Image (spheres, rainbow, N blue to C red):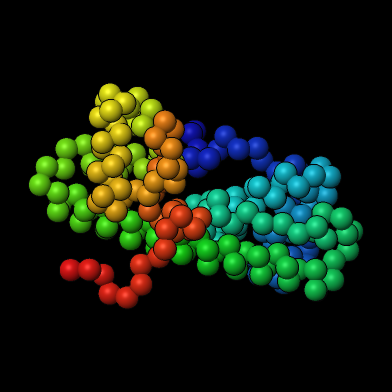
Amino acid sequence: MLSSDPLEWRDALPTSVFDPPEAAEHPPLIRAIDRVRQYSRQLGTIAPWLGLPFSLRDQGLSHVPLPCLCSGAKAMRLKPRLSDADWLPIVRSLQRAAADGTERLDQLERLYRDAQRAIVSEYRPGALPSLAALTIHRPLLSPQFVSEALGLTIAGASKLLERGVGSGLLVEVTRRRSWRVFVAGDLAVTFGYASPQRGRPRL
């Protein structure tokens, strides 16, 4: 019988990783972290912490694994016995990661709405919808890549990217004419290439 888990290809935790009898006294978040902690101590590396989103999903804390919820703490890997204070850093880091992920999702949704308005306002949108869709999968673009991805000439791709800048979809992060690089608007704000919009949006 086929599994309904779309991530069934991932390696299962070894049988030596288990919930101790007192685990039922703790919330699912602590149980999820402790499973990864056991695995990390067995392997002696930080690699198992990349699987924390899966452990959180398996405990019912998320519907799907969320990559932004990767976290870890040095004490979790090195200390054989943990004090209550040792749990605080990782719980707080997960709280920050969840808040940052929520903000990133809000930015992506805003970018989607802005892209729709920018395309609708164009008299002839042409390949702008394709460019907007491409930024979701490849937020860092060059004329060469856009040319190959959309079947355009280098000159045509450059003009399309300039239209994307003019409509607010992209921000150019280089000023060299021979090798130009463009980034999606939300990431340009995140990395300091553009200032966030303040106040009411323009009519």
Question: Of 129 and 152, which appears nearest the observer?
Answer: 152
Question: Of 195 and 16, which appears nearest the observer?
Answer: 195
Figure quadrant of residue 196 = bottom left
Question: Of 129 and 140, which appears nearest the observer?
Answer: 140
Write the residue at 48% across / 34% down.
2
Above or below, 99 against 112 in this view is below
Figure quadrant of residue 61 = bottom right
Above or below, 88 against 123 in this view is below
Q: Quadrant of the C terminus?
A: bottom left
Whether residue 14 is visible: yes
Figure quadrant of residue 93 = bottom right
> Would residue 29 appear left or right of 200 to someone viewing this image?
right
> Would residue 97 appear left or right of 156 to someone viewing this image?
right
Whether residue 136 is visible: no
Question: What number of labels is visible?
Answer: 0
Write the residue at 84% across / 71% down.
83
Question: Of 165 and 49, which appears nearest the observer?
Answer: 165
Which residue is most to the right? 80
Q: Position of residue 159 (x, y in %)?
A: 26, 36
Write the residue at 58% across / 62% down.
97
